[in-house]
Structures are given as structure tokens and as C-alpha cells.
Image (cartoon, grey):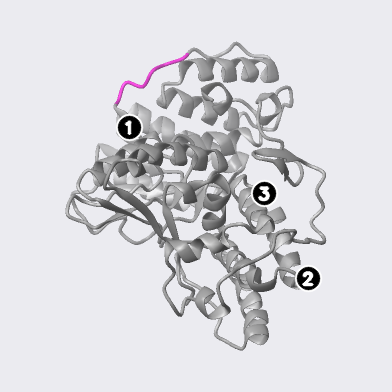
Amino acid sequence: MSRDMGRPKSLSSKMNTDGPLTRTGPNQFHSDFIATDFQSTVALNLPTTELLLGHTELNPATMAQTESVPLLEEAAILFATGQVKVAEHMLRSAIDLDNLGNAATLAWFMLFDLYQIEKNQYAFESLSLDYAGKYETSPPVWHNSETNIDAPESKDESAIPGLVFPSKLDGEIIKLLQKLNNLSDSSKVLKLDFGRVKTVDPVGCGLLLRAMRNLKKTKHDLVLVAAQNLTEQIRSILEVGRRDETEAPWLLLLEVLQLLQLKEVFEEASIDYCVTFEVSPPAFEAPTSKVTTAVAEAIPADENSDRFMMPKTIEGSTEALVKQIAAHAKNHDLVILDCSQLERVEFGASAQLLNGLVPISGTKGKSVQFHEVNYLVMHLFNAMGLKNVAAIFPRKQS
């Protein structure tokens, strides 16, 4: 896994994401599926629309009846593997064809969640009109969640100051980096969160590279959140042998790999960089300041809390997250995992999470429950088998 993390897509052994994916068996996919007409071959035995709309409580036994809708699980897996547009098209087509019976409302809720996560308010509002017309009831409400970069990062004065980078790492981050420069004057420890980054371009890479090098010169200690996600987004725009206008994305990738002290991965990436630009490969330099890595926006509940707050995204290694959950579980027989802030779980991370929760749920007297789960994540969890180790309660639509 570590070898793949720093390599460009063209040389990495990764799941093919050039086209849509379909499952031909457990955890098997091929890429010739066309999302046009979806016929469910499973007899649906689902709760009533009233129950699905959140007007009554769901219990684990009831939720078990909603767990075998192959099309919806397929869409959830596509979303988890980053094929957002394909997942969107599949859900939109299912809604238009209206061939899911009582499960139709679940497809609507999944699409609402997708638009909310992607911050596509126009599509969300358009879907709301269609929903209200079809069901003659109020649609889910759009929630504004954008962070104001001019606002303080935290009301807790003891918290580590830092920044959460936006979904697009482009020229617009210059305002954010100006704020980072101001923060660096007042604190020797800074937190950089890359959990929301979904796309990068050379300009944004160049700006961030300059900022990272400045922090190295000033010997700032760093807390890097979801740095692996950043490396994945950078390498998605790289191709060995293709000489782009700027070397900035390559150099930023190498800079981050050094901060993460991934020497072997760094050396592989440096050779690819050398081949591409016909230069001598740079030498690995371990960071001289303290660099700590963290799970994306992990917010573990304190010892006295009844709930454990799950992070906004779960990707890459889940080892740190599982350790936090296990620590919380020591003080609680009923382990409630609050997913109200959770937007997306990476496909591979969901399998790791399952493996990590098995020992906890298997402990005598312990039970694990996911609460307030969005519908995309719920169907991913169902497809991956987390229903076998925990009860899954979807969030109410309001």
C-alpha cells in the first residue's frame, strides 16, 4: 500500500476508475456497465414511506429489511471509490425509471446526500422540487456548511491553530495561505487539514509548495491531517514521461512524502520525477521539526460522553481511528458512533473499519451502533457487511 501511495496512477496497481464499475461477485468489478436501465432482481420487503421519511424510529431488526438493494449498494460503492458522476447518474436514472418499489425513497435520499456532500445546491434544490411534487411532502433541507476562511478556526484558545483546505487546491488558496502566514507568526505548531481536497492543479500545488518550504525553513512543527489524501490527488494529475509546464506538483508530492518520512515511496517517486524531467533524483531529507499525522477531522468523544464523534471522511489507514473507538469502548457497553458529520468512507477504508470493529463488537456485553448515517454511507456499510457487527441507523431527513 505504501508503495502505491506516492506513485502516479499510470504506474500504480489500483482499481480502474476510467469507467463505471460493476460487481460481478463479492468485491469483484468490471468496467463495461452502462447506467441506463436498472432492474432489481431482489424481492423488496421494505418499511413504509412514513418510516423511511423519519416519522418513526428505526430499530436494527427493521433496518435489516432494507439491506439488500443491489442497485443502491452499487451506487454507494461507486461513490466510495470516487466515481461520483457515475453514482449520481445511476441514482438519477433509478429515480426517473421508478422501478425500485418501496426502496425508491432511499434512492432519493442518497442523491440528496450526494448533492449536499458535493455542495451542489442548484441540483439539490431542483431535486427538492421533483421530490415535493411526487410525494407531496416537504423535501430535505439544504444545510450551509462552508467554512468562512476569515473566521477563527477554533473557539478553544488551547487548540492548535491551523487551516482546513477546500475541495479545490488551485489559485484561490492564496487567501488561505496568507492566513497561514499570519498564524505562523503567532504559533510554532500548525495544523494543516487536507481531508476535503478532491482536485488539485499546478498553480495550487505551486502555492502550497512555497508555503510548505517556508514552514520548513522556519522550523514549524506540523500536524498533517489526511496527508495521504493530498498525495493521491497530486499523483492523479501526474504521468511519468509527460513533461508539464511546471514541476510544482511533482515537487509538492516529494515534499509531502518527506514530511511523512516515507523514504521508500519518496525514492520511487523521485526516480519517476527524474525520468520525466531528465534531472538528477533529489535526495531524501527527513524533517528536522516534529511532524504528526492524524485521521481526517477525527473528533473522539471524551471519557464522559455517551457518543464517539466520527470524522468527516474516513480514508486510507483506519488504525488510528479504530484505536480511538476502542479506547472509548472501554468505558461504554453500548458504543454509539455518531456519524452526523461523516460524509464519505473510502471503499478500502470501509473494509479496514469492519475488521477493526469485529473485536470490539465481539467483546461480551458490548454492542456497536452507527447513528445518524447518511444514506450513501449506510448502503456502503450494508454492502461491506458492517451490518454483521453493528446496528446502522440512518439520519432523519428534515
Please, what is the dominant secondary structure of the magenta stretch? loop
Residue 123, above or below 228: below
Find disc 2 in the rendering and name its residue.
97
Q: Bounds of the magenta span?
A: 284-289
Q: Secondary structure at mark 2?
A: helix
For marks 1 and 2, give the one nearer the viewer: 2
Percent position (x, y) of residue 260?
42, 26
Binning the other alpha carbons within 10 Å of mark 3 as few (below 14), some (14 to 19) or many (20 upward) gives: some
Q: Amino acid at mark 1?
A: Thr
The amino acid marked with disc number 3 is Gln
- Disc 2/disc 3 C-alpha distance (Å): 21 Å
Report the residue marked by disc 3. Answer: 83
Front in this rendered view, residue 284 or 323: 323
Q: Are marks 3 and 1 in contact (CB under 8 Å)?
A: no
Name above or below for residue 308 compared with residue 274.
below
Give me the residue at 39% from left, 32% from top. 214
Which quadrant of the structure image shows residue 9? top right
Question: Percent x, y for residue 111?
Answer: 62, 65
Residue at the disc numbered 1:
292
Quadrant for the N terminus, please: top right
Calculate the distance from the C-alpha at mark 3 to the C-alpha at mark 1: 30 Å
Q: Residue at 59%, 48% (x, y): give it.
A: 80
* C-alpha separation, residue under disc 1 versus residue under disc 2: 49 Å
Q: Which mark is residue 114?
A: none
Which amino acid, mark 2?
A: Leu
Left or right side of 32 for 295: left
Does residue 144 appear left or right of residue 102 in this picture?
Answer: left
Q: Secondary structure at mark 3?
A: loop
Residue 199: x and y in percent read 60, 46
